[in-house]
Amino acid sequence: MRAGGHACTGALAGALTSSAIGGLTGAELGAAGTAVGALLGAGAALLPDLDADGATAYRSAGPATGLVGEALQALARAAYRSTRLPHDPPGEREHRGLVHTPLFAVGLGLLVACGALISPWITAVVLVLVLAPGIGALSRSGPGWVRRNLRTHRDVPALLAAVLVTAVLSASGAVDQLGWYAGATIAIGMIVHSAGDSATRSGIPWCWPLRRSCGRCGSGCPGARWRRSHVLPEALRWRVGSPSGKRIERVIEVVCLLAVAWLLLPDLAHLAGMRA
């Protein structure tokens, strides 16, 4: 799946996560909380592609995210070399490898949540790095007036917008409370990214590091850990970048953006009523 599809599905996941947290904890997050959740989810859903040079998340904050991407690629190569089994495919498998696994997503989410206990500055830095690619990708997928007037579909304006959002949250004291919530949203957004990739013909290694038999060798199979799996039957998967794939992903983007707007509508209507 391309960046726009990932960002829009992540935005819906983030908005739903925000609504669920509000319902479970009794916190009245309102439209601002849902909007921040959507932006955070959109950015988180792009993070797995830090393992690909030139991806939206890789270039979103210039050299900073480039260095993070290179470090994650090196980690992915090391993980593949050290855990591969005889029936795993040859090569480095840095893209759609370790960083795309659910285990990595949960681990990164826990790391962000724990970092928030050390300092809110850690949460603030994470927010900037995660929000920037999300804002950029959503701007490219959203209405044309956003691109014409805000220019946030470009990397630098998107980064500046992420800094501005984070500064507003810091000034309001919200960053102090965002740590565990941000960690949960990042984990969910990354898993949503993996689900999107595994709906295409590419697939991702959902079961790593568990050993899986190949299904052909019987009980003596030496197994594989990096075999890619899918969430759709073969007939329903699409090839990323193909004309039909682009149409499918565009429909997904529109549906997700409309769903986020629907989630925001009650809170926005309530705010409008209060002001009236």
Image: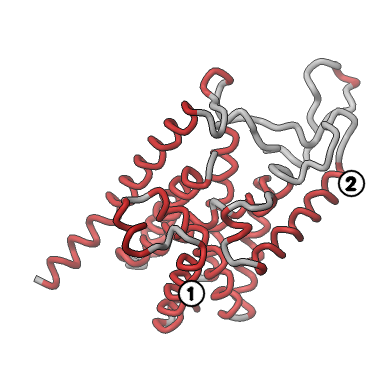
Classify 194 as above or below 271. above
On screen, residue 254 above or below 270? above
Looking at the rendered structure, the kind of residue marked 2 is: Ser
Quadrant of image for the N terminus = top right
- The structure residue drawn at horizontal position 56% and vertical position 21%, both measured from the top left corner, is 233
Q: Mark 1 points at which residue?
A: 163
- Mark 2 or mark 1: which is in front? 1
The residue lying furthest to the left in this view is 276
Q: Residue 253 carries which label?
A: none
Task: Specify the quadrant that holds the C terminus.
Answer: bottom left
Left or right of residue 172: residue 50 = right
The answer to whether residue 82 is above or below residue 30 is: above
Q: Where is residue 270 in the image (x, y as percent from the top left)?
A: 18, 63
Q: Residue at x 36, y 61 (%)?
A: 35
Label whose residue precedes the other's in the sequence (2 or 1): 2
- State the image coordinates of residue 243 (x, y, percent, origin top left): 48, 28
- Judged from the image, the secondary structure of the residue bearing numbered disc 1 is helix
Q: Name the residue under label 2.
A: 82
Determine the residue located farthest toward the front in the rendered image.
148
- Are the residues tagged 2 and 1 within 8 Å (C-beta)? no
Q: State left or right for residue 68 relative to residue 258.
A: right
State left or right for residue 211 relative to residue 178: right
Distance in Å between CA atoms under marks 2 and 1: 38 Å
Q: Which residue is drawn at 24% across and 61% down?
A: 267
Q: What residue type is labelled 1?
A: Val
Nearer to us in this view, 266 or 200:
200
248 or 259: which is nearer to us?
A: 248
Identify the element where label 2 is drawn: helix
